[in-house]
Image (tube, rainbow, N blue to C red):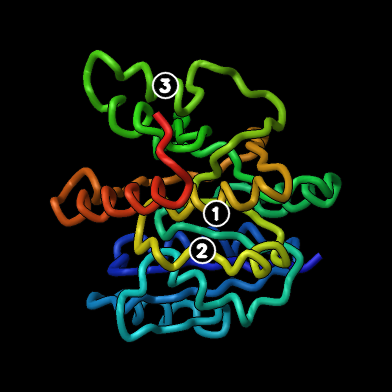
Amino acid sequence: MKVTGSIVTYNNSNIIYQCIQSVLEQTQDIDFTLYVVDNGSTDKTPEIIKDHFDGQVRFIQNERNEGFGGGHNRVMNEVQSDYHVVINPDITLAENTISRLCGYMEENPDVLMTTPKILNDDGTEQFLPKYCPSIRYVIVSKIKPFRYLRRRYTRQEEIFTRPTEVEFCTGCFFVIRTGLLKELGGFDPRYFMYCEDADLSRRVRLRGKIIFYPMTCATHKWERDNTKSMKGMLRFMTSLFQYFCKWGLKV
C-alpha cells in the first residue's frame, strides 16, 4: 500500500514545522511520500521547509498564490499511490491516523474518501459540517435565533462511535483513493478558497461512500480568515455563489 500526502502553505511560518514534523513522525509505519506546495509565501515558510525537511519531503514552490485547490492540484501529475491525503498546514497528528484510515479503506472497497474526528488544541471535538451546504446551514445559521441549524449541519448532537456515512468531507484533513482523485481532475480550479471540499465531496458521492471515521483523530487549529477580514468574507461568498450555481440552490 503506497500513500502520498500534500500540504499547501501560504505564510504559515508559525505552524508549518509542527505540521510536517507530526505527519512524518506518524507515518513511519507505511510507505508514505509527503509533498509540500508553497503558494508564494513572503515570510520564512520556504526557508523553514528547506532547512528542516530537505530530503524528507518533496517541495514545490509556486511563484504566486494558486489557492487551496490549485495548490493541491499541482501534485496530481506526480503522485503514484493507492491513497492520497490532503492536509491543512494547521493540522497536527499525535497517532498513526493516516495508516488507520487507509487500512479501513483497504478493507472497504466501496469507501472512496474518509475523514477522522477533528479536535481542537484542548482536545475537545471540533464539530465540522457533515451535510452539503445550504442557505439555512451556511447563512441562516449565523443568525442568533437559528444557531441550532449549525449544530444540525455538523450533526453535533449525535454520538458517533463507529464509521458513519456523511455527505460532506472537510478539506482540512481527509484520505481519498488516488486513482479517483485523478479521474475527477482534483479540486475544481474555479474555487480559489472555500467550498472546494464541498464540491469534491459531491463529485465523490456520485461514485461511492464518504465515511466519517471517529476511532482516530487529527488536531486542527482552524485559522479561518473568512471570519476575520472583508477579503476573506468576499472569497467565501464568491465560492458559495459558485457552488450554488454549479449544484443548484438548496434552502
Estimate the x, y position of residue 153 in percent, counting from the top left.
45, 27
In this view, 179 is above or below 211: below
Estimate the x, y position of residue 130 in percent, counting from the top left.
52, 33
- 226 or 235, which is in the foreground? 235
Q: In which quarter of the image is the N terminus?
A: bottom right
Residue type pointed to by label 2: Phe
- Determine which residue is flagged by label 2: 187
Q: Which of marks 1 and 2 is nearer the N terminus?
A: 2
* Residues marked 3 and 2 touching at CB (< 8 Å): no
For the residues labelled 1 and 2, the Cα–Cα distance comes to 6 Å
Estimate the x, y position of residue 251 in percent, counting from the top left.
39, 28
Q: Residue at x 28, y 53 (%)?
A: 238
- Determine which residue is flagged by label 1: 200
Residue type pointed to by label 3: Arg
Dot 3, crowdedness within 10 Å: few (<14), some or many (≥20)?
some
Q: Dividing the picture into quarters, in which one does residue 57 lie?
A: bottom right
Residue type pointed to by label 1: Leu
- Determine which residue is flagged by label 3: 151
